[in-house]
Image (cartoon, rainbow, N blue to C red):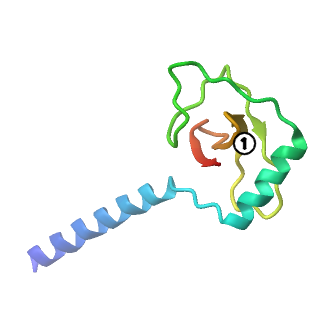
Amino acid sequence: MKTLVSSLLAAGILAAGTGFALADTVVIAPAQQKVIHEYVIKQNSAPVVLPSDTAVEVGTVVPDTVEIHQLDVPDMQVQYDYMVVNGQTVLVDPQTRKIVEIIH
């Protein structure tokens, strides 16, 4: 019985950890990507040049010196900011300044 309880507890902790990992994953549907892309084009935001030691990849924290803009798109479940880098729309978590999605 003790082994069963330990096994269930371990499985629960593992499942909880997986849930936290999935929370960092952003999935933007293609239709929503199109809406975001059109919004960014209308805003005519100037492209951003990141410092040479800052990679444009999911998980990278954008330095405070880089200007990011509020993304005001209807029907977004979560609020993101954005910047334009190398012709790509880069979505940023406004709380952590982490890159969460790159729309090509």
- The image quadrant of residue 61 is top right
Above or below, comparing residue 56 to residue 10 in the picture: above
Identify the residue at the far bottom of this view.
1
Q: Nearer the viewer, residue 27 or 47?
A: 47
Q: Position of residue 37 (x, y in %)?
A: 77, 51
- Image position, residue 86 (x, y; %): 67, 33
Nearest to the observer: residue 21 or residue 91:
91
Q: Type of residue at label 1?
A: Asp
The quarter of the displayed image where residue 46 is located = top right
User: Residue 2: where, in percent of width, then height?
Assistant: 10, 75
Q: Which residue position holds label 1?
A: 81
Who's the residue at 52% across and 43% down the image?
Answer: 58
Residue at 72% over, 36% down: 84
Q: Is residue 102 above or below residue 45?
A: below
Considering the image in quadrants, where does the N terminus appear?
bottom left
Tell me the residue at 74%/27% (across/down). Answer: 67
Q: 10 Å neighbourhood of mark 1: few (<14), some, or many (≥20)?
A: many
Q: Residue furthest right?
A: 42
Q: Which secondary structure lies at badge 1? A: strand
Residue at image coords 81%, 45%: 40
Question: In the rendering, at what x and y percent does residue 17 appear?
Answer: 36, 58
Front residue of 99/39: it is 39
In the displayed structure, 58 sits above or below 26; it is above
Which one is in front, 81 or 57?
Answer: 57
